[in-house]
Amino acid sequence: MKITAVETEIEEKPVKHQFVWRKGLPGSGTHAITTKLTIKTDEGVDGVAYASRGTIMVDLVNRRLRDMLIGQDPLLKEHLWHEVWEIDRIEELPIYALGVVDIALWDLTAKVAGLPLYKVIGGARDRIPAYASTVTFKDTAEFLDVADQCLDYGFRAIKLHAWGDPKKDARLGQDLRHHVGPDIELMYDGSAGFDLLDSIYVGWALHEAGFLWYEEPMREFNIDAYRRLAAAVDIPLLSAETSDGAHYNIADFIRFDAAHLVRTSTGFKGGVTGGLRVAHLAEAFNMRAEVHGGGLPNLHLACAIPNTTYYESLIRSNPIDVEPGIGNDGAISPPDVPGIGWETELSQCH
Ligand SMILES: [Mg+2]
């Protein structure tokens, strides 16, 4: 089998629910821009992936990726994964661009196998609990209202993206725990809004409130700052969501005691191949690799690996508008069709 064409198509549409993140971070904006990447072959089977960016992805395909891919065997994914790393050495690819080719190649591979992707790459389970991952709402009352709606729907775990104010965020975590009681799992995502001192303060508050994990309170450039934080608080740290270098970088977070759980994803860790590497590396240390972000490739990854807990489902609005596929048991299954299942209604999952 040989790759015969690599096509891109930009799609722009209005955002259904505009939302904001913590103070300082850009929010959803008004329009979502996506690039569809299609890899075609001489045997008629093709692979598809989506990048949540526009012209920058098209430019990379036009200048680098298409020439590298044409004429290659699409099933030699390890080889092609390393070829993309070589392009990364020259281009310093955006982290979200690193895995797009790999995801399309795995879609193609699973179609050739006639199996859903998660059964090709691992098959740890066919259904996984989802957590409600909030955007940033206006005030505590609105967060508690949204939490009630999520629990009524069937979610059993909630993660906060709050305001990025250490005192207010700490109080929100404690108020939410008081509101939902002891049996709901709670997590907090700092989206890198703090320095070390504020991270320690929030970490202790979340520990007192019995949170399951404390995610990315600082930018992930400096591993030593995470090591110091891990030594200073008792709450489990979930680290390395946005750090560059996939498993090469995660190895250092683990080696230097800068994480209790690590982030993996198809989006930021080099596609399916990189996401699996991170998960398997973590498993060797009896650590969980929690899958960052929603969408079908991440859902397949989460169902493929044993050492993860949840699928991340973004709650973008109040009233809540739960993505397709999440049942009233708060869980979700990948599409039971060959490949990733882009043609199913679950392709609308976030
Ligand atoms: Mg996060």
Image (cartoon, rainbow, N blue to C red):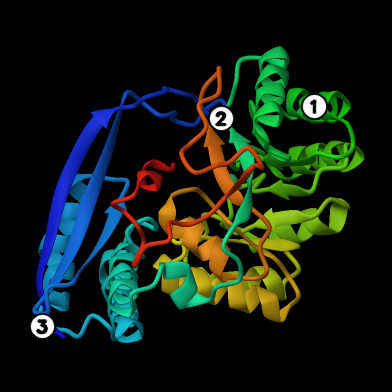
Q: Which amino acid does label 1 sit on?
A: Leu
Q: Residue at x 26, y 38 (%)?
A: 33
Question: Which percent across, then down, holds residue 89?
Answer: 32, 73
Q: In this view, does 15 lie to the left or right of 226?
A: left
Q: What residue type is labelled 3?
A: Gly
Disc 2 and disc 3 in contact, CB within 8 angstroms: no
Q: Can residue 248 be seen in this view?
A: no
Tell me where residue 289 sits by quadrant: bottom right
Q: Is mark 3 on a helix, strand or loop?
A: loop
Question: For mark 2, what is the residue?
Answer: 135
Horizontally, residue 44 falls left or right of residue 84, namely left
Relative to 180, is 43 above or below? below
Cα gap from disc 1 to disc 2, whole angstroms: 15 Å
Judge whether 148 appears above or below 309 on screen.
above
Q: Residue at x 42, y 54 (%)?
A: 296
Instruction: Identify whether 86 is placed above or below 27.
Output: below
Q: Which mark is residue 71?
A: 3
Instruction: Find disc 1 in the rendering and name its residue.
Output: 176
